Amino acid sequence: MTEPSSWPNGASSPMTEDEARLLDAWWRAANYLSVGQIYLLDNPLLREPLTRDHVKPRLLGHWGTTPGLTFLYAHFNRAIKQRGLDALYITGPGHGGPGLVAASYLEGTYTETYPDIPPTVDGVQRLFKQFSFPGGIPSHVAPETPGSIHEGGELG
């Protein structure tokens, strides 16, 4: 087995408590943004009691695969940063789309591509409403997803 210190493009080191805390916070934020895309039509930060009017009438998108995809995305980005890698994240589950949209939103590439969806409460509202909604974006990773190179679901 290769020694961790001899990894290409940089050394590997154990995660610090602060890194673990930040990684967990990022993962929880990505999961919240993901579940919000699937379920919420309004009230994105739950600043008022949740009502039926806040929930989308037709739910599309799959939650089950999403936490795993966001978990991998978070840890893969840590490895990329730590080792200075030039890498490509390839996934097959197409309906984990909310997780990849959430990740690109958190890292800023979503807003770079779609400036009308800024990192604000109004931006989160738009992000949630457009997901799998008429006139919005598909429930899967699609060409519209920043960083996507292929239609989701066809690799799995």
Image (cartoon, helix red, strand yellow):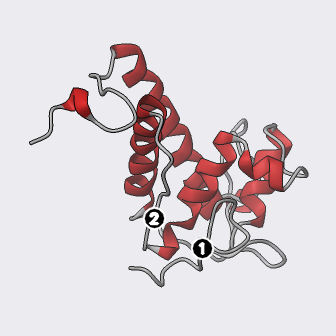
Where residue 109 appears, as percent x and y from the top left, is 72, 48
Q: Residue at x 74, y 72 (%)?
A: 137
Kindly state the secondary structure of the residue where label 1 is placed. loop
Q: Residues within 10 Å of mark 2 (few under 14, many from 20)?
A: few
Q: Residues within 10 Å of mark 1 (few under 14, many from 20)?
A: some
> Does residue 46 lie above or below 89 as drawn?
above
Q: Residue at x 69, y 60 (%)?
A: 146
Q: In which image quadrant can residue 16 be found?
A: top left
Taking the view exactly as shown, the residue that stands out farthest to the bottom is 154
Q: Hey, what amino acid is under mark 2?
A: Ile
Residue 128 appears left or right of 10? right
Residue 18 appears left or right of 94? left
Which residue has dot 1 on it? 59
In the rendered image, the quadrant that contains the N terminus is top left
Where residue 99 appears, as percent x and y from the top left, is 54, 57
> Does residue 99 lie above or below 144 as drawn?
above
Taking the view exactly as shown, the residue that stands out farthest to the left is 1
Residue nearest the observer in this picture, 5 or 30: 5
Residue nearest the observer in this picture, 132 or 89: 89
Residue 118 appears left or right of 30? right
Which residue has dot 2 on it? 90
Q: CA distance from mark 1 to mark 2?
A: 26 Å
Q: Are marks 1 and 2 in contact (CB under 8 Å)?
A: no
Where residue 12 appears, as percent x and y from the top left, is 30, 27
- The mark lying in front, picked from 1 and 2, is 2
How many numbered tags mark residues here? 2
In the rendered image, the quadrant that contains the C terminus is bottom left
Kindly state the secondary structure of the residue where label 2 is placed. loop
Q: In which image quadrant can residue 53 be found?
A: bottom right
Residue nearest the observer in this picture, 44 or 12: 12
> Does residue 98 lie above or below 143 as drawn?
above
